[in-house]
Image (cartoon, rainbow, N blue to C red):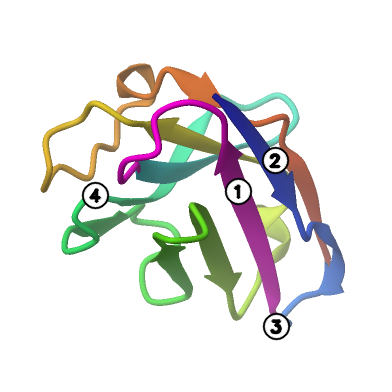
Amino acid sequence: VQLQASGGGSVQAGGSLRISCTVSGRNEGADAMAWFRQAPGKEREFVAAVSRSGRRIRYGESVQGRFTIDKDHPKRTVYLQMNALEPEDTAMYYCATAPALRWDTASTIANDYPYWGQGTLVTVSS
């Protein structure tokens, strides 16, 4: 299983950015997918997750109300729409997938996701 993230870049505070991540490889079933981020000198932080069913979605407290996760099942692609960006959102954003999670589980725990992408950098300037 491989994950390819794209769409990162630089934006000014208050702006928007959309990043995406596509899954390829074995296991063509529905995937639970998530975004995590890690800023320099900080621990990895949960951002958003969507269950295999697509019905369960969870957000990290710091992005609630500003970010939206969306999954296109046939394309095996997950998107993260980021609005009202703040300098504190600057980080490397990693997508992850868990093909074997329970159908309606949107896990916030990094260890639940066995497959990870390479990351895409988001920089927000003030």
Residue that carries the numbered disc 4 in the rendered image: 51
Q: Secondary structure at mark 4?
A: loop
Residue that carries the numbered disc 3 in the rendered image: 14
For this rendering, which residue is in front, 14 or 69? 69
Is tag 1's residue or tag 3's residue first in the polypeptide sequence?
3
* Alpha carbon distance from label 1 to label 3: 27 Å
Residue 3 in the image: x percent, y percent? 62, 35
For this rendering, which residue is in front, 71 or 40? 71
Residues packed near mark 2 inside 10 Å, few (<14), some (14 to 19) or many (20 plus): some
Residue that carries the numbered disc 1 in the rendered image: 22
Is tag 4's residue or tag 1's residue first in the polypeptide sequence?
1
- Quarter of the image where the N terminus is located: top right
Q: Are marks 2 and 1 in contact (CB under 8 Å)?
A: yes
Q: Residue at x 39, y 60 (%)?
A: 73
In the rendered structure, which amino acid carries the disc numbered 2?
Answer: Gln
- Quarter of the image where the C terminus is located: bottom right
The image quarter in which residue 120 lies:
top right
Q: What stretch of residues is rendered in magenta?
A: 16-31
- Asked if the magenta segment contains residue 29, the reply would be yes
Q: Are marks 1 and 3 in contact (CB under 8 Å)?
A: no
* Alpha carbon distance from label 2 to label 3: 26 Å
Q: Secondary structure at mark 3?
A: loop
Residue 52 in the image: x percent, y percent? 24, 47
Residue that carries the numbered disc 2 in the rendered image: 4
For this rendering, which residue is in front, 81 or 74? 74
Residue 62 in the image: x percent, y percent? 43, 57
